[in-house]
Structures are given as C-alpha cells and as structure tokens.
Amino acid sequence: MKILVLEPSRVQQIILNAMFRACDLYPEFVASLASAMSEVDKAEYDCVFTSYSLKEGSGVDIARHLKRTNNTKTSVILLTTEDRRTILNDALSAGITRIIPRANTVELETFIRELADSDVDYQQMSGKVLFIDDDRTMTAIICSMIEASGSECISCTNGEEAMALIADNHFDLVIADYFLDGKLTGLDTLLAIRQMGGKRARTPVMVISAQTDVERRIEILKKGANDYVAKPVVEEELVVRANNLITQKKLFDRVEEQREQLRNMAMTDQLTALYNRHFLVEFAPKRLAEAMRHKTDLSLMVVDLDHFKAINDTHGHDRGDQVLREVADILKSVCRKEDMAIRLGGEEFLLILPHCSAEGVIKKAEELRLLLLKTRPARLDVTGSFGITCLEGGNQADFSDLFTAADEAVYEAKDTGRNKVIFRAVASPE
C-alpha cells in the first residue's frame, strides 16, 4: 500500500511514523503542500494523510487538487485540531474521505490498523511451521503443500525432537499427530509447549488424530490446542486451516508489537529518547523497593544544565534541542545496563544507579561534569550542576526522600557557583 503523509511538524511526523510502522506500513512524508501536490502528480497513492493546518493553505487543498486532476482512487484523510462540524461541509465537498481529530489517538490508531489489515492477503500470510508425524509419506505431502502456500515447513518424528527444535526456533504454527514415536504423545507435546515461558507458550498448535469421538476432541481443545483435524486428513483442508492459524498469530503479533511501541512512546521522551516522568513514576519505586529488599546501595544523580535559557536565547531553540540530545547521549554512554537515564523536563535529567555506593556516585558525577566540558555539546561550552545522594544498603526511605535530597543538592550547587557536584545525605526517618 502506497501512502503519503503531509505533515509540517517534525515531532508529529515521528509520532505518526511510529503508528504506521507498528502496522508494517511505511509511508512517505512531505512537509509542504507544494511537495505533496508534486508527489501525487508523479505517482499514484492509495491514501494521503494530511494535516488540516498548513502554511500555504489547508489540507483540504490537496483533496481539491486530486479532484481537479480526476484522481478518484486516492483516499484523503484529514487530521485536525478543529471541531469536525465547522469544516465538515467544506472537507466533504472537496473530496476528503475521513476527518480524524488529532486528540483522538485511539480512532487514528484503529483506522491505521484497519488500513493495514485491508492490505493483507489473508491466505498468503506466510510463516514457519513445525510438522510432527512419524508417517513419512504424510509428512512429505503436507510439508510440500505448506511450502507451496508460501510457508517454511520443518518436520520431525517425535515429541522430544520437537521440543528441542521449538526451544531453538520461533515457529508460527506446530502441527502434531496425536500418536508419535518416543515417550511424548502429541498431547504431551502440546502441554509441554503451553508450559514454556514467553511467546513460545502462545504458539498455535493443531492436533491430528484418528480418534473421532467428541470427548477426545474436547479434551484436546481444553488442553490448549487451537485446532483439531480428524484422520483421514484432507490435505487441502489441513493447509487452509494451517494458513488461517498462521495469519491469526501474525496479526496478534502485530498488535502486540504495536502495543509495545506505543507503551515505549508513552514512557520515552521524544526529543532525547531517554525515559520520561511517566516511566519514573512507574518504575523508580520498584527499583528502590528491590534495593531495600536485597539491602543493596542505590544512588540518584540530578543533572541541571547551567544557563540553558541563555543558550536558547543566544543560539536559538534548535541549537538548544541539539544540546539536550547530545547531553542525553553522554548520559547514556556512561550508564550500565541496570542504570536508568530520565529526562525530567526542560534541561533537567535524572540518573537512577542501582548497586552504586556514595563513593561511586560522587566519582561518576565528577567524571560526567568533566565529560560535559570536554565534549562541548552542539559545539558550545556547556556545564552542569550535579546533585547526588545515596541510600546505603540496609537503610529504608521513600523515593521522594531520595529525590528531595538530590534536588536540594542541585540547588546548592547552583547557589554556590554552578558547574560542581554536591552530595547530600538522605534525611533520616523520624
């Protein structure tokens, strides 16, 4: 599917691109009405998403342009902050297909997902299949048909070999005969798969059996099978059922990936790609609870860039944004796997450092202070005030107590000349 997005805002482009990519759609982006008109004149697009507010006019103008050039195949979706009712007549008469409020992200995400699903050839979604059967003739026939439909098919003859293959591979479908060579039956193999951790436990499983009684079929389905096929097998029916299960799994995986991406977006600062306050509120208390439970050190470091307003005023906000991004990269470069780097807002950052002693956090803060001076983010002389604290192993405190100590230390650093590191102990509980 060929999609064009007319969006002048770089931030909105990033947000929209994440939504599209979560649904395996990869649109082209332009920032001006003139560029959009040029693109639709050169190539045929299935869909154009456009911002309503543009410097050269409005998003309705692209629909009018398509109408003038007798392009009736391209749908135009208008993204707007305006009340839909105030622009409805003008938009519809121009040829706008749909109006979606920017604030209604659920409606927009649903529409994009439906757009992606409409572009899927349901029968041709391919995957990786494991076929378990000790009948080599049946295996050859079924695997050949599965591969002809576009999927990869790996075969084995017993449950033990199957479990080893599943542990080392990600399959989109497992097809197992009820009776197998070896100790594990097809039902045992099904149960073993369902007891695995993570995504492998959700792998669709189809069971084949010569047992045709209703009770046996119900038992197999209750144990977690996604489908049941009775022998003698109609090969074409089995392949169609297999394709359906593969497609359902692929679509489910896509939704899960989208949810994860949206969750990451909600937890991540768009400018710096560091975690944000939402992440801090959810995860910081958990890290502190772990440290207190295991009686290990946990340190906090608040970093506040000095004279940042002057940087924006003198060099412009784009240069200021560049400073923030490069400072974020510096913070990430010194973080260990278990550390968390967070942008609190503006020019203020926070590092949460598990298993880091008071001596360790003082040393790290001083190294960071010198690294800022040496690196010169955005080719500017940038310094920072550092406020640090540490909860030593075995002590108890609320996260707010730690943050208050580090925050007060930052204010002291700023009040006493900036570009320095100040340590403040956590206040003892009364």
Image: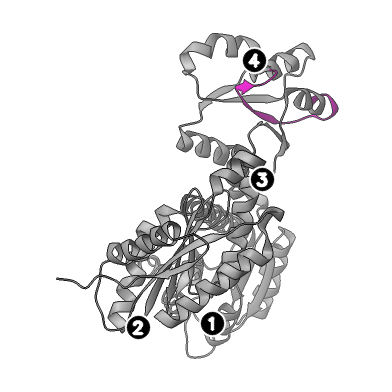
Q: Position of residue 339 (x, y in %)?
A: 48, 71
Q: Identify the amino acid type marked 4.
A: Gly
The secondary element bearing badge 4 is classed as loop
Q: Position of residue 427 (x, y in %)?
A: 25, 70
Residue found at x 66% / y 42%: 315
Mark 1: few/some/many CA within 10 Å (<14, 14-19, 20+) = some
Q: Is residue 313 magenta?
A: no
Do residues under tags 2 and 1 come within 8 Å of each other at their CB atoms? no
Q: Is residue 48 magenta?
A: yes
Do residues under tags 4 and 1 come within 8 Å of each other at their CB atoms? no
Q: Position of residue 285 (x, y in %)?
A: 32, 65
Give the label, 4 or 2, closer to the camera: 2
Sequence-first tag of 3 and 4? 4
Which residue position holds label 2?
A: 296
Residue found at x 69% / y 16%: 61
Residue 163 marker: 1
Quarter of the picture containing the C terminus is bottom left
Q: Identify the amino acid type marked 1.
A: Met
Residue 95 marker: 4
Question: How many callouts does the rendering have?
Answer: 4
| Region rendered in magenta | 40-56
Q: Quadrant of residue 57?
A: top right
The secondary element bearing badge 2 is classed as loop
